[in-house]
Image (tube, rainbow, N blue to C red):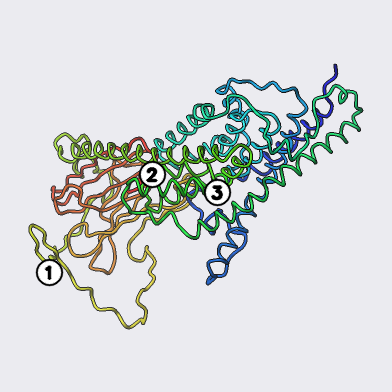
Amino acid sequence: MTANRKFIILLIFLIGVASSFWLVSRYPALDNKAALSGSENFEDPLTHEAHFHAPRKASFLTKVAYTTLNWYETNWRGMAFGLILAAGFFTLLKYIPRQSSDRRFRNSFMGMFLGTPLGVCVNCVAPIAKGMYEGGSRMETALAVMFSSPTLNIVVLTMLFSIFPFYMAVMKLLATFILILIIVPLISEKTRAVPEKQALEFESPTSCSLNSNQLSWPLAFQSASLDYWKSFIYIFGRTVPLMLLAGLFGALASHLWSFDRLIGVPINLLNLTLLSFMGTIMPLPIAFDLMLAQAMLMSGLSPAFVTTLVFTFGTFSIYSALIIYRTFSLFLAVKLFMIVFVVGIGLGYISNIFLEYRHVNWLAKYDTIIDSPDKRSNTYSSEEKLQNSVKNYSPVPMTRYDAPIILTQGNLDIHALAHAPRNKKTGKPFTQRIATELGITYSNSLTPKNFLDPLFFGRGIASGDFNLDGWPDIAVATNNGFEIYQNMNGTRFKKIFSGIEALNGKQAINIALVDLNNDGWLDIFLTTFNDGNFVVLNPLPYEGQISVLPIPNGNALLTNA
């Protein structure tokens, strides 16, 4: 018996559409988002790029309108693909005999396998899940496709593990697998029933019939096109209005409340509940969820809160809930929302417990390193180990200036020194000067060797009174550790510290001047790219003895100073 020609025609069509979307649009766009993550300014609360710009002094409703339009513009390609594929599955599954399996766990795994390469967001995959289910697939299969497409495709996973801490990425991945492979099968129906609404409102476009095998190719093409068009109209009418409503709801929510309100607040049930709720309902485009979570992390939002957002963003949305309600039931929509919501809260708590444990453990290691100077293998004097370095450490003798005490409380003395009078000759509060004219010789030149992330973003700089003479000195991160420039009475700078052997060749990124051993002298905290963290104790109170101490950083590629 020959194959069903209508099935073949529609299958070829769907393969062509999917291939074009993945290769020409979806994955290049995701790659671009991955490359821009951490360096892009968001112009709109729901999208990474605003195509319609609201006036600066626009009203609240005007801003909501512009955000809604930007959301529509960002999602229309993915939504169009979702509608096309949804209608295709709806029609295609009608051409083959029903071989529905009651093995729910296997069905969920197959759904995950099918949904992972789709690469569409949680909003755009919802019509696909609807089309699959109403075409004849099992509930758990359709739901597994819905959850796996926005969370498990290769580009999103690459972004997840590259821009977030390893523990956070692993927690997100494990929670997603548990949701798809365990929770979805357990809450799905044991037996599949044809949706009552579909039976009343829509006549099946076709059925598996031996007669269709006898159609000529032109007639089969004509018949398949008609079946597909009927399916498309059906899917379009039942999903697009809900999409328009979800975009408006998301715009309203984004302007009524902002995630940065939780920056600095304590980690408790109330705050985690609010954050998880907002993260679960927001209809964010694919990969933008990770970009927004990363922006929140860089803005100072607690990693525990960010862990919650990393999971809830992109896993569920108000649009997903509406489609599930329309396709399955209100009870299932509420149940899935509560599951994602509660899991998000739990992940936030687990992340916080882990961070507190790691912090205490890190402090214990740090205290061991700092309090054991006699056991440091990297302790040496500048004369003994660095005699080949030119002016490695040569501070200019300066008179130590003790500012008058303005307040004494317990064992704490506060000193203050008045600023010098402003030079009124130029008529400007600040004067731009070339660094080299002031004696600062290091320049972070862009070369083929350092033309990669994060080196091309630049290096850190810190200021502080390193030698306690009353003038702020400058410390600069370099490709060989760091350099320190001594302030010469506010007129120029002189390089006094560079070329430490233990840091030679290490790409320093962040640097901070801080008193780490409580001796009253500023020490140097340095983070490098892929070479760990280091503390260099101020050698002035130790007769020029230089101590370079490696600090644990959990094998991270880069740690913020």
**Which of these two is toward me, 150 or 372?**
150
| Residue 521, image x, y percentages | 17, 53
Relative height, residue 201 to residue 473 (above, below)? above
Query: What residue lies at 7% left-to-right and 59% top-to-bottom?
Result: 410
Residue at x-position 20% and y-position 50%: 538
In the rendered view, tell whether residue 445 sits above or below residue 365: below
Q: Is residue 31 visible?
A: no
Q: Position of residue 71 (x, y in %)?
A: 60, 54
Quote the CA–CA distance across marks 2 and 3.
36 Å
Label 2 sits on residue: 507
Q: Indicate the position of residue 76 as horizontal and vertical percent values.
A: 67, 50
**Dot 3: what SS?**
loop
Q: Could you tell me which residue is drawn at 90 percent across and 23 percent down?
A: 214
Q: Residues within 10 Å of mark 1 (few under 14, many from 20)?
A: few
Q: Name the amino acid type tagged 1.
A: Ile
Q: Earlier in the sequence, mark 3 or mark 1?
A: 3
Mark 1 or mark 2: name the one nearer the start of the chain.
1
User: Marks 3/1: CA distance?
Assistant: 53 Å
Q: Amino acid at mark 2?
A: Gln
| Residue 22 horizontal/vertical position (percent) | 67, 39
Instruction: Give the mark toward the camera: 3 or 1.
Output: 3
> What amino acid is found at the position of numbered circle 3 in the picture?
Leu
Q: Which residue is mark 1?
A: 406
Helix, strand or loop at mark 2:
loop
Residue holding disc 3 = 284
